[in-house]
Structure formats: structure tokens, C-alpha cells
Image (tube, rainbow, N blue to C red):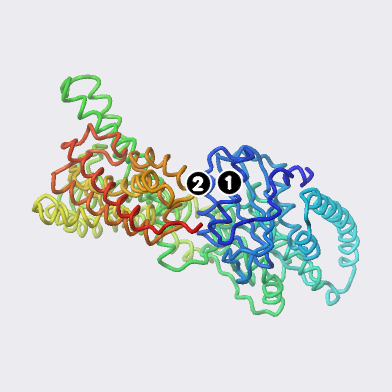
Amino acid sequence: MDIRELLLKDVMIMDMHATTKDEAIDELVHKYAEQGVINDEALYKKDIIKREAESTTGIGDGIAMPHAKDKAVQRATVLFAKSEAGVDFDALDGQPVHLFFMIAAPEGANNTHLAALAALSSLLIDPELVGKLKKATTPEEVQQLFGDAQAAKELKEAKDAAAKARKEADAASAPAGEQRPYIVGVTACPNGIAHTYMAEAALIKQAEAMNVDIKIETNGSEGVKHLLTADEISRAKGVVIAADKKVKMARFDGKPLVNRPVTDGINKSEELINEVLDGKAPIYHDADGGATDGDDAGSSNGGAWSEIYKDLMNGISHMLPFVVGGGILMALSFVIEQFVGDKSLAFTFFNQAGNMAFAFMVPVLAGYIAESIGDRPALMPGFVGGFMATVYTGAYGGVYVASLSAHAKSPAGFLGGIAAGFLAGYVTVWMKKWTKNMPQSLEGMKPMLIYPIIGLLIVAALMFFIINPIFSVINQWITHFLNSMGTGNAVILGVVLGGMMSIDMGGPFNKAAYVFATGAFTATQNGNLMAAVMAGGMVPPLATAIATAFWPKKFTDDERKAGISNWILGISFITEGAIPFATADPLHVIGSSVVGAAIAGGLTQLWHVSVPAPHGGLWVALLATNIWGYIGATVIGAVIAGLILGVWKPARKA
């Protein structure tokens, strides 16, 4: 595919007006909307900002490549824009950005489009092309420059392929001491649209300049390309990983390995290659000794807490469909019961369907926490550990009753399930290390016998004799505290939980509050705290909707449009609708939202509101014990937050 088919002349800005990063994003996204490339300006902008929050796309040398892949995009397109004055885009080198390439990829982008996007990205490491683009004055000139660059690249690749074949033949017959160094690498970024391929191109170009042979595997939107073989890894002097997401690491066990962010692959390619060539790269040791090449063991550039949070979120993300689906069906069954009684088929059907889904909540949570830590071998003991946390009855050393009732008495419950997941994960990691030096002939026994039997035995013993007895005390204390809490204490807890829902709008604080309320709900079958977190979580998007409606001049065109959609997102308990506003103006948006959300959460407890559903926002208001109290708390909190935001937010500069 010709790159010029993506670089449309009508979707270019040859003289940008923006002077700040926010203005640049607004101007670029709005251009896409004007030309019909996207049909939801707010959604696409939200995903652009989300990508920028992960790491800046200002890659240095005056270039930025903001990009997003979502359902708002109607066709794969690259928007070229040029700023003569330059924009402070938080670039990696701290310099102003003059050239912008905003990449829009639809959710169902075909391989042809993705390959073209990858090719365009790789061309941008050529300083000669970049220099010419900075001098270009017309869209036609930009298209011609890329067309010429693509043709030259294809010609060079053909010549290089022929030269490589000759070189490999000569190398095979050359003495060992005369052979060129050979290294392998992997590049990957979260979206896999631009940085993945720019890092690949930069490493290949640098290796060629250093007289080094290199092969790079890319983990991009097209999937894995140029997959490294076991023979290539074995022959390599070392490995360069330039990635911001998980890549398969077990296969590199015992090899010198450099593990850096993907941007280092673009900007520090020489440093990475030299680290391998100079023998400074540390030897990589996999927990399973490289025996599980198929596992999704991944690189990690984060700390211990980020890993724990990632593991917990893996469990919660898999658990939520069970919580939402099962919880709401159960709640609906209680409404049906009021009209037709508990003997009717309608009540029985809704109640049993909800109960069955809800009963899997803790086992799924535990299983997928374990899977995140120890990969697939940890999944089964994690599930069983979580199940044991939900069906245990009796005192220390008591019996297990295999009942799929959501109301089963559980001394371990939600917290015990979390503990079971982490136990199963780390027990599996320990087993992999313990069996690392087993004879090769016994490798097949690991996944079929050793991991499932020993893993289950250890986790079951820990749950039966230690975790359940300990967490029985904790769970009973929490249940007693929640049931005996006076109105004053309940209001304080509601204030705290409601405020936490707005601090990071879907982040760790938000998830911690939601998980606590869900755990309390499963332990006591009391939906008081669910009302607090839902009311608190609805406030931020509703507050931004109110502020944009009554103070429109303080917001951009895109923000005003996003404010309209936030009415629906707000009443649906989708807090993330406020994220674009919080990213652009965190102080005023988060500050006002926390105040309003805390008030909403506190009012639900003051008015004794209980919502027996773990999701749904105001759509499940009919299920609340105090319908008008639930609606009133949410509306009051949202109005207060909206008023604070509208008054407090400074006027936009002309």
C-alpha cells in the first residue's frame, strides 16, 4: 500500500495555530472530525490523551506521533501538521515539536493499513527526510517526499536482502574470529502502531552502522512479526528488549539481556547495542529456566507495587462481569419478588441465574490474580483457593460444603479470595524455580502432574489451616463493624469512599473503594456502601456536564461536546467520562469532583440508602431502599461539584 493513501492532502495542517500541547491535540483531533475521519471527537481525544498519559509521543528531534486506535475512527489515516514556531509537547529531548503525525487506526484495521502505518513510522528516523519535511510548504510536496522515501526504502531493502544472502554465505565459510557480531531484539509498545516500528528501524539502522548483524521481532498491532527462532536466540551474543508491554521472556533464559522502554530503542539504540557487545548486559534468568516459551511471562519495568496492582487488576477485570451481571439479576429478582412472591418461576429464574454468576466472583478473582503471577499453571490452584474461601463452613479444621449459594457463610470471603490468588501465584513461581534443574526427560511431567498436584495440595492446605481461620476473624470483625456502625460513622465512611471514587477516576483509589464496597456487599448482603461508591462515582462526569452547560466559554469546543455525552456516562456510573477533563485541568476538575463525590457518598449513608446491585448508576435506582435519597444524594453532589468547577475554573485565554 502506498503511504500517500494514508497521508491525505485534505487532512493536513501546514501552519498550526496551537501553542500548547492541549491546544495542539484539540486542533489535530478537530481536523479529523471536520474531514469525517472520526465520528466521535470526544472518544478519540480521550484515547489520544490516555496514550499521552502512558508516555509522551514527542519522540524528539522536533517530531511527535500522537496516536489512537478505537471505534471512532472510520478509516486508517495519518494527519501531517507543521508548526513553524514549535509546540512544547513534553518531548523526550525537551525541545519544541515542529512536525506532527497523528495516526488514526480503526478497531478493525486490516493488515495492509497497519503495515503502511508501520512503514511510515520507520521512515521518520531518517534525518534527511525530516529536514525536507520541515521545509515543505504544500500538501503535495509532503506526499511526494514520502512517496520518494518509500520507494528508496523498498529499493534499499531489496539490495540489502541480496547483500545479506551473500554475507551469510560468506560468513558460513569464514573463520569464527572474522564473523560479525549477531544480536536479537524485541520491540513493543502498548498500542503497537508507531513506536514499535520506529524502535525496530532505529536498532537495525544503528546495527548496520556498527557492522553488527541484528534481527528484531516486533509485537505490534499486526501481531508478532519476524518471530525469533530458538536457533537465532541461541546464536545471538545477547538480546535487546525495547518494550513498554509484556513480551515472552522465558525463551531468553541464560542470555545477556538489556531491558529498556521502547523510546530508548528509538533514541538510545547505540547505547543498547553497545551494552550487549561490551558484555555489560546482565544474564537473564527466567523463573522456569526457559521451559515455558509459550507462557506469557513478560518484561517489566515497574516496581513491586506496580506488579501487585497489575496482578490484582487482572483478577478484578475478569471478576467484574460476574459481579455486574449476577448482582443486577439478583437485585431484579428481589423487585419481582415484591409483586409475585418467592415461589414464582420469574423470581426463581432471575434469582438463580444471578446467584450462579455471583457465586463465581471470588474464585474468578483468585484464579486470575494467580494467573497474572504464575501464568497458566497457577490458574487451577487459584480457582480452587478462591472457591474454598466461599464455601467453607464451621470452625477451625471444619468441613467444606460445596454449595454454589451466594449466601454461603464464609470466614474468608472476598479478602480470603485475594489472599488465595496471591498464594497460588507465588507458590507456582516457587515450583517453577524448584523444578528448574529437573532432567529434560521429565519436563512433560511439570504441567501434567507436578504443578497441578503439588500446587493444589499446598494452596488447599494453606487455605484450610491458615488463611480461612485467620480471615474468619478479620471478616467477622468487618461484618460486625459494618452492621453495628452508627449513623455518624457510616456517614464518615461514605464520605471517604465517595471521595476516593473521584480522586483518580478509575485508578487505584477508585478501584480500592469499589473493591471494599463490593467485598462488604458480598459479606453482609447490605448494599449501603454500594450506594456510596456509585453515587460518588457518578459525580465527576455529571459535574463536568453541568459545568460545560452553564459555563461553556471556559471550555473548548471538544470539551463542550464531551460534556453532553457525560450526562449519559454519569448516570450510568462510568466515572472515566471525566478523565479527559481531569487530564487537561487536574486541579480544578479533581478538586471539585472529590468535594461533590464525598458529599454524595456521605448523604447516601445519612439517608440510609442501600442499593443491592454492584453497578448500573441511576438506572438501578428502582432497586434502592430509598430511591429519592439515592437520586437526591447523587444530584446534590453533582450540582455542588459542577458549581465549584464552573466558578473556580479560570476563563480560557483568547
Q: Secondary structure at mark 1?
A: helix
**Kind of residue sitting beneath label 1:** His
User: What residue is shown with label 1?
Assistant: 30
Could you tell me which residue is drawn at 68 percent across and 48 percent down? 78
Q: Which quadrant would residue 149 be assigned to in this image?
A: bottom right
User: What residue is shown with label 2?
Assistant: 558
Vertical position of residue 140 compared to residue 126: above or below:
above
The residue nearer to you, when weighing 55 against 473, is: 55
Check contact, mark 1 vs mark 2: CB within 8 A.
Answer: yes
Quarter of the picture containing the N terminus is: top right
Across and down, in percent, residue 263 comes to 62, 65
- In the displayed structure image, the side of residue 396 where residue 635 appears, left or right: right
Q: CA distance from mark 1 to mark 2?
A: 8 Å
Could you tell me which residue is drawn at 58 percent across and 46 percent down? 30
Residue 427, can we see it? no
- In the displayed structure image, the side of residue 502 where residue 6 appears, left or right: right
Across and down, in percent, residue 563 comes to 42, 44
**Kind of residue sitting beneath label 2:** Asp
Q: Which quadrant would residue 262 be assigned to in this image?
A: bottom right
